[in-house]
Every structure is written in structure tokens, then in C-alpha cells.
Amino acid sequence: MSAVLTHPHFAIAAKVVLTSLFWIAGLFGVFKFDVIVQEMVDVKLPAPRLFAVATIACQLIGSALIITNFAGLGWLGAGALAVFTLLTIPYGHAFWQFEGPKRMHEFQIALEHITVVGGLAIAAILSVNS
């Protein structure tokens, strides 16, 4: 197992998998921009087109920085995606505003987001130690 875990291709594959949530969503946004703008409208963000562009850029650039660790900036990509992910909880998954099954569903999504942030923290740590 040590040979697998220390192989450079395994590290790249792991980073691709970790960031897949973001780069897939970013690519979707590039091709379905109006859908992303509507999401921004739905959560009542000002300047929804600007927020849509910022979201897509964060998702794609953050993912690329983690995967490549370009100029040693993998930590920056991980940090940007972590902040983005945490901000989606109050704006998109405010479980405390709901009752019953909807509350539990949104709470579970919030917990999943926090778990992803933990993975991003590990990616940030590894980017400065490689």
C-alpha cells in the first residue's frame, strides 16, 4: 500500500477526485451560465451575473491550483474553495430556517460541506509540504 500512496500519480488522482465537485460544477457553469445566474438570483445575491462569474472562477481556478500546486499555490486554491464552501451553508443550505425533513436534509448537506472543508484543509497542508 505504501507504494501506491507514495506514487505521484496517486496524489494527482486524489486531488482530481477531491476537487471534482468544484471543477465539474465550474464546467457546468461555463456551459449553462444562465442556470448559475438563476441560482444567485434565488438566494438573493446582488449582482447575480458577477457572483456567477466569481463562483465559476473560484471553482475552476481553485481546483486547478490544488491539482497542479502551480507556483506552490495549492494552499490558496484550497483556502478559496473552503471559504466558498462554507459560505454556501448560510446562503444555500440554511437548515435552521426550516422544519421537519427539509431541516434535516439541509443539515446533512451542511455537514457534507464541512467534511469537504476538512479535505481541503488536508490538501492545503500537503501543498506546502510537497
Image: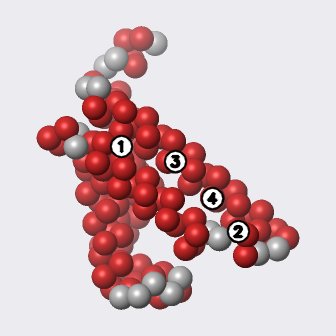
Find numbered disc 1 in the image and state the secondary structure of the residue it sits on: helix
Mark 3 Cα shell of 10 Å, populated few (<14), some (14-19), many (≥20): some
Q: Residue furthest top?
A: 2
On the picture, is 60 further left or further right than 92?
left
Nearer the observer, disc 4 or disc 1? 4
Q: What residue is disc 4 on?
A: 110
Q: Are marks 2 and 4 in contact (CB under 8 Å)?
A: yes
Residue 24: percent from left, percent from top: 39, 59
> Mark number for residue 95?
2
Q: Residue furthest left?
A: 71
Residue 40: percent from left, percent from top: 45, 82
Q: Amino acid at mark 1?
A: Val
Find numbered disc 4 in the image and state the secondary structure of the residue it sits on: helix
Nearer the observer, disc 3 or disc 2? 2
- Residue 27 seen in the figure: no
> Mark number for residue 116?
3
Residue shown at 28% from the left, 48% from the top: 76
On the picture, is 105 further left or further right than 25?
right
Q: Is residue 29 above or below residue 65?
A: below
Residue 63: percent from left, percent from top: 31, 51
Q: What residue is disc 1 on?
A: 16
Color scheme of the displayed model:
secondary structure
Find numbered disc 3 in the image and state the secondary structure of the residue it sits on: helix
On the picture, is 62 further left or further right than 36?
left
Residue shown at 31% from the left, 19% from the top: 7
Specify which label sits upstream in the sequence, 4 or 1.
1
Q: Amino acid at mark 3?
A: Val
Q: Are marks 3 and 2 in contact (CB under 8 Å)?
A: no
Residue 33, quarter of picture: bottom left
